[in-house]
Amino acid sequence: MAKDDYFVIMYQLLKILYDKLKQGKSITDDEFNMLSDKLNETYWHYILINMANEGFISGVQSISTLNGEDIKTHNVKITPAGIEYLFSNSMMERVKNTLKDIKGIIPGI
């Protein structure tokens, strides 16, 4: 799976948000921006809106602007549904295993 694959990005965001929740912290702007660093904005917004619509994350809102649709984020958190999806979905398990394999081959990923 490519680093910009929908499910890879989804897994990484859910994992970070879950780890932050357990630490009693929120995701930083830098951490949030690192996930979207090499993605086009439309694709990143698509991922966030769909994750919010599916109930996996909160703090993401679609807004209408003069230029069309945009998003507003504030205090993005994983939801109980997101935690369940992270640990019980077979696609998330495959992504996790793929990322583990890649990290073994290419350190620093």
Image (cartoon, grey):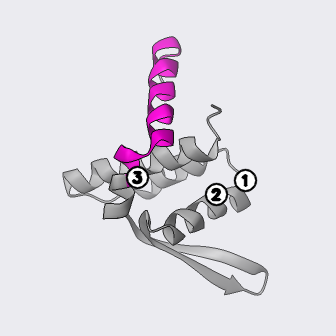
Q: Position of residue 8 (x, y in %)?
A: 55, 41
Does the image show residue 109?
no
Q: Position of residue 13 (x, y in %)?
A: 46, 50
The type of residue carrying mark 3 is: Tyr
Question: Alpha-carbon neighbours of circle 2 within 10 Å: few (<14), some, or many (≥20)?
Answer: some
Marks 1/3: CA–CA distance: 25 Å
Residue on which the image places disc 1: 40
Marks 1/2: CA–CA distance: 6 Å
User: Which segment did they paint magenta?
Assistant: 85-107
Numbered badge on residue 44: 2
Question: Alpha-carbon neighbours of circle 1 within 10 Å: few (<14), some, or many (≥20)?
Answer: few
Which quarter of the figure has residue 70?
bottom right
Which of disc 3 and disc 1 is earlier in sequence?
Answer: 1
- Magenta stretch, main secondary structure, is helix
Label 3 sits on a secondary structure element that is helix
Residue on which the image places disc 3: 85
Q: Position of residue 10 (x, y in %)?
A: 52, 49
Q: Position of residue 27 (x, y in %)?
A: 37, 56
- Please tell me whether mark 3 or mark 2 is closer to you in this view: 3
Say whether marks 1 and 2 touch (CB < 8 Å).
yes
Question: Alpha-carbon neighbours of circle 3 within 10 Å: few (<14), some, or many (≥20)?
Answer: some
Which residue is depicted at the point 72% across and 53% down? 40
Which residue is depicted at the point 67% across and 44% down? 38
Label 2 sits on a secondary structure element that is helix
Check the image and name the residue furthest to the top.
105
Which of disc 2 and disc 3 is earlier in sequence?
Answer: 2
- Please tell me whether mark 1 or mark 3 is closer to you in this view: 3
Say whether marks 1 and 3 touch (CB < 8 Å).
no
Label 1 sits on a secondary structure element that is loop
Which residue is depicted at the point 37% across and 46% down? 88
